[in-house]
Amino acid sequence: MNNLFKALVILLATCTPALALPILDIEKTTNGPTNSNPTVPDYDNEDTAGGAGVPVLTPGSVVTWTYKLTNIGDVPFSFSLLVITDDNGTPGNAADDLTTTGGQITFLSVQTGDADNLLEPGEVWLYRVSGVVQNVAGYENAATVATPNAPGTQGDSDLSHYATPRAVPLPATFALFAIGGAAACLARRRNRKR
């Protein structure tokens, strides 16, 4: 009986097709020409607001988000099936999302692969979009990848951040000195006019 069971297991293993694993991974990085952080962002070190690679960007300047899409499963995806969405820093508002279907996020290059319009297992593609740095202390946005027309695919999401320079508050003693100095200056001017 034991040999019969083993034979049945071997038969089932050789006759049953392997289950397909359609799995995508997305990593996102943020940068811009005004970045004053000496640590370069690298897709991972700006995932949290306090990450070492969070770029410090000047409000009103250009910010560029780059998305690295990797097929970590065993099923190829055609170019048209892949949908990348960036919440543009407003997770509750889909109206301002940046997407590949809307044309804001565009294909940049094939980092690894044969450029045949199929994201095959192990291949890596890059996408990009640019925007304007908001005048906020910290900014967080999330990117997701999905295949709405290919149900069953395990998509992914990734956060990225940037910061802006903050005004350094003056010490209270300096502020009092400045106010006192200004008052003394005004008093001298009044005395000169008399």
Image (cartoon, rainbow, N blue to C red):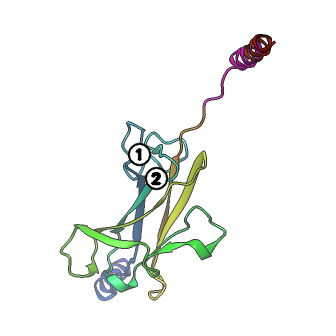
In contact (CB < 8 Å): disc 1 and disc 2:
yes
The residue under the point 41% across, 55% down is: 29
Percent x, y for residue 101? 45, 82
Percent x, y for residue 139? 57, 52
Residue 123 magenta-drawn?
A: no
Asked whether residue 122 is in view, the answer is: no
Viewed as shown, does residue 90 lie left or right of 125? right
The residue under the point 79% across, 11% down is: 191
Percent x, y for residue 147? 45, 81
Query: Considering the image in quadrants, where does the N terminus appear?
Result: bottom left
Q: What's the distance in space between the residues labelled 1 and 2, CA to CA?
A: 7 Å
Percent x, y for residue 158? 49, 60
Q: Which residue is mark 1?
A: 34
The secondary element bearing badge 2 is classed as loop
Residue 146, compared with residue 44, is above or below; it is: below
Q: Which residues are magenta?
A: 168-184
